[in-house]
Amino acid sequence: MSAELKLKAIEIRKKLLSMIYKAKSGHTGGSLSCVDILVSLHYGVMRLNPKDPKWADRDRFILSKGHSVEAYYAVLADLGFFSETELETYCRFGSRLTGHPTTKVPGVEVNTGALGHGLAVGVGMALAGKIDKKDYKVFVLMGDGELGEGSVWEAAQVASHHKLDNLVAIVDRNRLQISGPTEEVLRLEDLQAKWTAFGWKVLRADGHDIDQLISLFKALPTVPQTPHLVIAQTIKGKGISFIENRKEWHHHVPNDDEYKRAMEELDEQIRELEKSCTHK
Amino acid sequence: MHSQIAIRVGIAQKLLELAEANKDIVVVTSDARGSAAIEKFFERFPDRSIEVGIAEQTAVGVAAGLSLCGKKTFVFGPACFYSARSLEQVKNDVAYSGADVKIMAVSGGVSYGPLGSTHHSLHDIAVYRAIPNIAVILPSDAHQGAAVVQALLNINQPAYVRVGRNPVPLLYSQQEDSFTFGKANILKEGKDLAIMAAGEVSWHALEAGKILDSMGVKTTVIDIPCVKPLDAELILQVARSVGKIMVVEEHSIHGGLGEAVCSLLSKNYPVPVEIIAIPDEYPVTGTQSEVYSNYNLDYSGIAKRAQEFLRRIEIGKIHTRD
Ligand SMILES: [Mg+2]
């Protein structure tokens, strides 16, 4: 399981880089940062049916950090929500693959991109699940810089007040936002204490450890009648040495040389992964 | 003399009635149960009543989530907040995402009166008109308000419904035939001047029309509950047959029904239009009716402004088509 999904994550990284490189547009750092979270949820946790995207009992996922759309589209295409070849149209004239997710794309639940919106929509979907007595879960992925939006905290209060234990929020805690380190731009810590005070059960995970993420998500809720927040410790630009932890790569587009070197690094990771598998 | 009822009361009663059969109806509010008159809904259907506290942005986001899971979600709260603070949620989570949410904006226009401009919504039609995929509706009495709720249940499209706060006279004798989505209603016909209005000023427009009739100016009066989509066919037909139009609205002079009508006419059949609205200023302190009176939005003001408009045409300051 683990090696297979690790390989999947590397392939998704290659695809998203290719999309950004070809479109000359995108959010490289944040997309790379959340790939392992997306892969864990979509391949290891969530109940989905790509042939029936509107299936009433599906688990819901909201990419509240909508700018990481390249990683998300790559995952949806790989799952079969739409064709892989359509990824080539990303950000092209007339394409439905806009630079932030929209419901025109099969599998996308709500249009995101303006930060601080996803959690409230997730609360609504979780409430609908409660009203309908359905057992689906709602996952909302937020950026850490996004937590500056007051609407996040409004929705956090509403979620715990309504005891939404079918709601899971995840913070892609890469400690960077567009202008620099989150703690310099606007201090976020103590995140655990803040969310706990808002009535949430807070858990921590290595946001790049797919096995750990899957077993953690599968065990939720650990506390009944309580929404859960997973602080996923991540590295912005994860997987490519010269992109990792560089704020410039928030929406920097790789040039020819950078693209070539990035793909070489990812190919090397695939070879190492295959080697370690055959040795076992 | 006239029996009066607040439109919000007519809306709340209708929703309560419809929710017995339609289990998809859900109400969301932001500590506005009282002002929206929906306490009874909360008592009767607690499982389908969502309180989010004083958090209008979240109310709209939550409503979008509910509707994207198949609910018919009605958000109730003051128009002043739902046309500004939560506008981004309306644009992105509701209209852009195609979530079938109805924003039921109560205490709109200047109906909060002396509470001042923080509590007025005189820009709401302008901003909502500029957002694609959301209808803009201003019921003019409690019967029509109820009819709007019924109609919206069968229209899978977002809508912004703006009503006032105070009891107002009934313009229609019954709910039936008072509202068809996208259609305007002819209240009376006359050849000299057409008065068009939306919302609570429509009653005043009709009364003004009657006063003018008695003075020998035969008026057509049109109630336009659907500001978007606009009933272009009827408005153009009236422009052709009457040729002089007044538009009355409880809104800023900028971007409301008046400019919507002008935009339609300028492209298709230009005729003189006089708009009575709130000028580009924060209104004078006063009750809703005092503010109406100050800006000629009541029937006597409308009748006075109509005579001035016709006089300017008569002396050649404004030219008609013929
Ligand atoms: Mg970040």
Image (cartoon, helix red, strand yellow):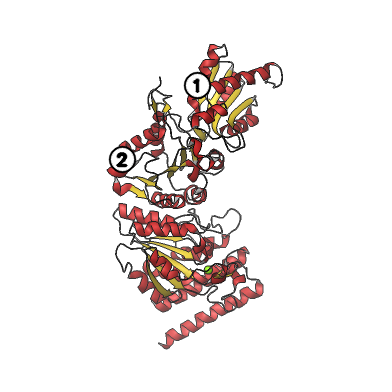
Residue appearing at x 57%, y 66% in the figure: A27
> What residue does disc 2 label?
B40
Discs 2 and 1 share one subunit: yes
Q: Is residue A197 above or below residue B5?
A: below
Task: Give amino acid for label 1.
Answer: Leu
Q: Is residue B98 above or below residue B153?
A: below
Question: Can residue B169 be seen by looking at this rendering?
Answer: yes
**Quarter of the picture holding the C terminus of chain A:** bottom left
Q: Disc 2 marks which amino acid? A: Lys
Q: Tell me the subunit letter for badge 2.
A: B
Q: Is A62 displayed left or right of B255 in the figure?
A: left
Q: Residue at x 40, y 77 (%)?
A: A2
Could you tell me residue B149's position as x and y percent? Answer: 39, 36
List x then y, in percent, for residue A234: 49, 74
Left/right placement of residue A208 relative to residue A130 reads right
On residue B206, which mark appears?
Answer: 1
Q: How many marks?
A: 2
Whole-Å distance between the Cαs marked 2 and 1?
33 Å
Q: Is residue A83 above or below residue B30?
A: below
Q: Earlier in the sequence, mark 2 or mark 1?
A: 2
Q: Secondary structure at mark 2?
A: helix
Question: Which residue is depicted at the point 66% across and 72% down?
Answer: A256
